[in-house]
């Protein structure tokens, strides 16, 4: 059986459309399935629409969070509740083309355990959004050694991969990177991102920046190494200025360098504060992990 996991946040207009579209495609392909909607603390009628979809089709299941815990938590809740021999994670807005699920499933039948959905065309995006996305994925790719330039959450995972991900105890997770990291037999399918048929995107620029910082911090220690780089740069600059000051002193040309001193103090102070901020961020992540709170709280489950 195939489990299709659909995180949903304020998607009341898309629940019925997604359920009917996916059911039609998978029924036509002769694939046994369940549709698992995860309501991530929506403020509209998303949960009521999920319950109504289940009444129309018993293959629809629903998980309702007690509040908004984020898309990563919603995806992992779906993986933990899924009963299928393989699972597909799909955006509820259907910007990931649902027809590709059949192609992914056929590849899984051939023995592939992870089928990655690779973006061929990102659709209509602002230049800033494209630049920000490219910068983030370039940075995370260099930090982890994994090429994530065109990756997405749209992918199929075999049951053994799902069980491996579910067994990971960490609280702050990055699904897209972890599914790369676990390995297993991989292949790819390409797709073009579609435009929404209803509703609007929940990803503001601020949300994307927060998402990038959170996931880089949860999956890479590279920012901590930047502290050492800052220290080396500061040391080199200090040595250069020290040599210049000594030469001027020996030649008797030393002047009262008040401006230079102020610039050096501001530079060194800024580097120290940035370094302390990076270290403090990682300490906060350690604190979150040590507390051991659950990734999410389920208020209600229909299935």
Image (cartoon, rainbow, N blue to C red):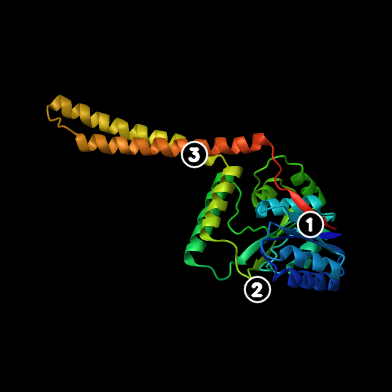
Left or right relative to 276: residue 248: left
Residue 145 in the image: state x and y as whole percent: 59, 46
Report helix, strand or loop for mark 2: loop
Q: Earlier in the sequence, mark 1 or mark 2?
A: 1
Residue 234 in the image: state x and y as whole percent: 36, 35
Report helix, strand or loop for mark 1: strand
Q: Name the residue under label 2.
A: 198
Q: In which quarter of the image is the N terminus?
A: bottom right
Q: Which of marks 2 and 3 is nearer the N terminus?
A: 2
Q: In terms of depth relative to the viewer, which is nearer, 17 or 225?
A: 17
* Image position of 53 with respect to 146: above or below: below
Residue 111 in the image: state x and y as whole percent: 81, 56
Q: Which residue lies furthest to the top in this view?
A: 250
Q: Earlier in the sequence, mark 1 or mark 3?
A: 1
Q: Is residue 263 visible?
A: yes
Left or right relative to 32: residue 76: left
Give the label, 1 or 3, closer to the camera. 3
């Amino acid at each position: 059986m195939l489990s299709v996991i659909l995180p949903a946040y304020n998607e009341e207009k898309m629940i019925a459309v997604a359920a009917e579209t996916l059911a039609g495609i998978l029924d036509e392909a002769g694939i046994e399935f369940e549709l698992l909607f995860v309501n991530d603390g929506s403020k509209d009628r998303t949960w009521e629409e999920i319950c109504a979809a289940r009444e129309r089709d018993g293959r629809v299941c629903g998980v309702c969070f007690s509040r908004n815990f984020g898309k990563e938590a919603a995806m992992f809740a779906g993986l933990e509740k899924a009963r299928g021999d393989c699972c597909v994670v799909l955006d509820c807005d259907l910007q990931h083309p649902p027809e590709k699920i059949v192609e992914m499933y056929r590849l899984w039948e051939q023995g592939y355990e992870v089928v990655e959905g690779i973006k061929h065309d990102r659709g209509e995006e602002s230049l800033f959004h494209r630049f920000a996305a490219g910068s983030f994925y370039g940075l995370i790719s260099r930090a982890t050694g994994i090429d994530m330039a065109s990756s997405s959450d749209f992918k199929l995972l075999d049951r053994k991969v799902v069980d491996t991900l579910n067994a990971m105890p960490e609280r702050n997770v990055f699904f897209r990177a972890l599914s790369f990291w676990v390995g297993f037999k991989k292949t790819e399918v390409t797709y073009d991102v579609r435009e929404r048929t209803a509703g609007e995107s929940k990803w503001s620029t601020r949300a994307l920046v927060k998402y990038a910082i959170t996931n880089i911090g949860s999956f890479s220690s590279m920012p901590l190494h930047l502290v050492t780089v800052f220290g080396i740069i500061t040391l080199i600059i200090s040595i250069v200025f020290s040599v210049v000051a000594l030469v001027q002193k020996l030649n008797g040309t030393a002047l009262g360098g008040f401006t230079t001193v102020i610039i050096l103090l501001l530079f060194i102070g800024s580097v120290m504060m940035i370094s302390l901020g990076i270290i403090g961020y990682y300490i906060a992540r350690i604190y979150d992990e040590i507390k051991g709170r659950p990734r999410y709280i389920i208020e209600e489950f229909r299935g």
